[in-house]
Image: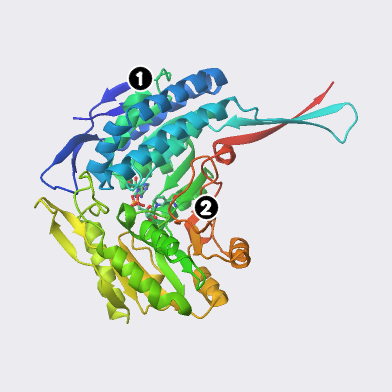
Amino acid sequence: MFRNFIGGAWLEGPGVARNINPSDTRDLVGEYAQADADQARQAIAAAEVAFPAWSLSTPQQRFDILDAVGAEVLARRAELGDLLAREEGKTLPEAIGEVVRAGNIFKYFAGEALRPGGEAMPSVRPGVGVEITREPLGVVGIITPWNFPIAIPAWKIAPALAYGNCVVFKPAELVPGSAWALAEILSRSGLPQGVFNLVMGRGQEVGATLLEDPRVAAITFTGSVATGQKVAAACVARMAKFQLEMGGKNPMIVLDDADLDVAVNCAVNSGFFSTGQRCTASSRLIVTDGIHDRFMLAMVERMKSLTVDDARKPGTDIGPVVDQTQLERDRAYVDLAQAEGGRLVLGGEAIAHSVDGQPGFYMSPALITDSTPGMRINREEVFGPVVSVQRARDYEHALALANDTPFGLASGIATTSLKYATHFKRHAQAGMVMVNLPTAGVDYHVPFGGRKGSSWGAREQGRHAAEFYTTLKTSYTHA
Ligand code: NAD
């Protein structure tokens, strides 16, 4: 049994959750203690007690701890990647890549702990000096989704600690394994008792407790729009700071002048890899008339070559969907798209077994053409291997279609024209823009986040993370 980590102690909870491998539902990944609201409050209390001393810890102390955590994560990439692939279903190379990213994030924020954070400037009044400094917030509640079980926790926990905050971390119910493994590393890192706490449990209970408790100064949340709205309402009601990273319906434009191989690679990578379960997935392809038919032929050829199989088997391109509920949801969207007038060109079937006969939640990647902007397949996030295609007359039409969405996370274009690439970077309504690259690949040291219905508040990652995890103080001194 894997336990919660509260106030420096490993504690059982009132419940137990079983974690199942989506590539083989007979495989029990582990049994994880489930905290309740009381234990969540216990973790908050421990973090609150630890905060005054931790907020005064030296940058060198924080550097040493975060750097060592990053080093251990990197050194154990194969083992942690295997666990991640086993519990979430992304392929082994993708899972190891995610673990490496998590390790690098800890090392990056180790460095950020040393960065001078303030400014000094003259006052408009004689003899007065002004200093602007950044201070930690206090207890930060961290609530994460299941699709990046170690990278998203890392990009929230590392900056929270680097800037001197204490943490209560509630991972997604479906992926406690990676969260627990990261917590275990943090528990041996030299952090004082109570600075970092892990509470596994249900969102409506443990997550909601973090939202409502006045001792939690700030909430950083990644997940669905529906839950994000609850986070926002609860935080506004008690004036707590919050940050939301939510869904996407990311477009990828393919222009007549695109390099066909580049366009297909971008579309397949962003649409289907990680089983389409990425907030930055290109789930909407917008293809101009002159290349449309050639692109579709190449796309279908490429899709036929993809292997859907056990996430940990060498050669697998696409692992399973995370669970039965998500599989049914993905399938329902394929049916809905057809009912709305779209044409299913390929895929979209639930597959009950891996190539070797293991029971799992597999699905063949689905491509739907003849779709129009108003169809739900083009407006709602599916979060599975389902991609729709819209035709566009020209670049201007394609850009208008790309921006016609309530979301604004990532937006991509495949083109060899500098003119269109430059125009697109300026006019795409998204927080992240990719030219001749998959929308789903991002660096770990630069801002991550979107606009419109995708995000709220300060950006994550990179040095801009300081805007969320610290608060400014302006001091005036008359010498
Ligand atoms: P979800 O909203 O169902 O759950 C996210 C987290 O919120 C979980 O830990 C859950 O337990 C918790 N939660 C649920 N109800 C809660 C409540 N009432 N109070 C407090 N916490 C609660 O999302 P999910 O299904 O785990 O993740 C998929 C979603 O995440 C997709 O929409 C995807 O686009 C989004 N996502 C966004 C980004 C990004 O950075 N923009 C990255 C990854 C995933």
* Residue 71 showing in the rendered view: yes
* Residue 193 higher or lower than 136, as above or below: above
Left or right of 461? Residue 93 is left
* Residue 210 showing in the rendered view: no
**Label 2 lies in ligand 1 vicinity (Cβ under 8 Å):** no
Which residue appears at 54% of the width and 59% of the height?
430
Q: Percent from the top left, x then y, of residue 440?
A: 43, 53
Look at discs 2 and 1 and give the one toward the viewer. Answer: 1
Which residue appears at 25% of the width and 48% of the height?
89
Which residue appears at 54% of the width and 36% of the height?
469
* Residue 289 higher or lower than 267, as above or below: below
Please give the residue where the numbered disc 2 appears in the rendered image: 456
Left or right of 112? Residue 180 is left
* Residue 136 higher or lower than 316, as above or below: above
Q: Quadrant where the C terminus lies? A: top right
Residue situated in front as seen by the camera: 298 or 8: 298
Q: Are marks 2 and 1 in contact (CB under 8 Å)?
A: no
The disc labelled 2 sits on which kind of residue? Trp
Q: Residues within 10 Å of mark 2 (few under 14, many from 20)?
A: some
Q: Which mark is residue 58?
A: none
Please give the residue where the numbered disc 1 appears in the rendered image: 188
Q: Distance between the residues labelled 2 and 1?
A: 34 Å
Q: Percent from the top left, x then y, of residue 222?
A: 42, 48
Q: Percent from the top left, x then y, of residue 72?
A: 37, 25
Q: Quadrant where the N terminus lies? A: top left
The disc labelled 1 sits on which kind of residue? Arg
Of mark 2 and mark 1, the one earlier in the sequence is 1
